[in-house]
Image (cartoon, rainbow, N blue to C red):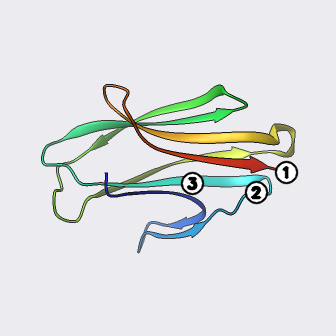
Amino acid sequence: MAEAQLCRRLSTTDWRCDPVVSPVAPGRLFFYTRVKAVQNTTIEHRWYHEDRLRQSVELRIRASPASGYRTYTRQTVTAENAGNWRVELRTKDGSLLCEERFVVR
């Protein structure tokens, strides 16, 4: 893994991320990931609300050992879903590579 970041806004033109500062207001959030891999692989983003899995997305990563392959997932959090959240980056076999925790208020 090269980089993973939770963003309020994400530009895929230049991969610019406006980082999230907890607590977070309701709205759309992005989990940006840049992975350096010598061969094609799969990663997973898992979004949890109060320790309950809300979304799991498998992402295919192309080999890109130099600059890294960029991808993201997004989650819209409403006021009704306020509370403790986390998003995880995991390998295909389930190993945890990165975790971002945040509170929505």
At 85% from the left and 51% from the top, the residue drawn is 105
From the viewer's perspective, is 88 left or right of 62? right
At 23% from the left and 38% from the top, the residue drawn is 41
Question: What distance separates the C-alpha of mark 3 from that of mark 2?
Answer: 12 Å
The amino acid type, in three-letter code, at marker 2 is Val
Q: Earlier in the sequence, mark 3 or mark 2?
A: 2
Looking at the image, is 95 positioned above or below residue 100? above
Instruction: Indicate which disc residue 95 carries.
Output: none
Circle 3: element type: strand
In the rendered image, which residue does mark 3 sit on? 30
The amino acid type, in three-letter code, at marker 1 is Arg
- Work out whether residue 33 or residue 96 is closer to the camera in this orientation and state it: 96
- Residue closest to the far left: 38
Q: In this rendering, which labeled residue sits more in front, label 3 or label 2?
A: 2
The amino acid type, in three-letter code, at marker 3 is Phe
In the rendered image, which residue does mark 2 sit on? 24
Circle 1: element type: loop
Mark 3 near mark 2, Cβ–Cβ under 8 Å? no
Residue 75 pos. (x, y %): 63, 45
Q: Earlier in the sequence, mark 1 or mark 3?
A: 3
In the rendered image, which residue does mark 1 sit on? 105
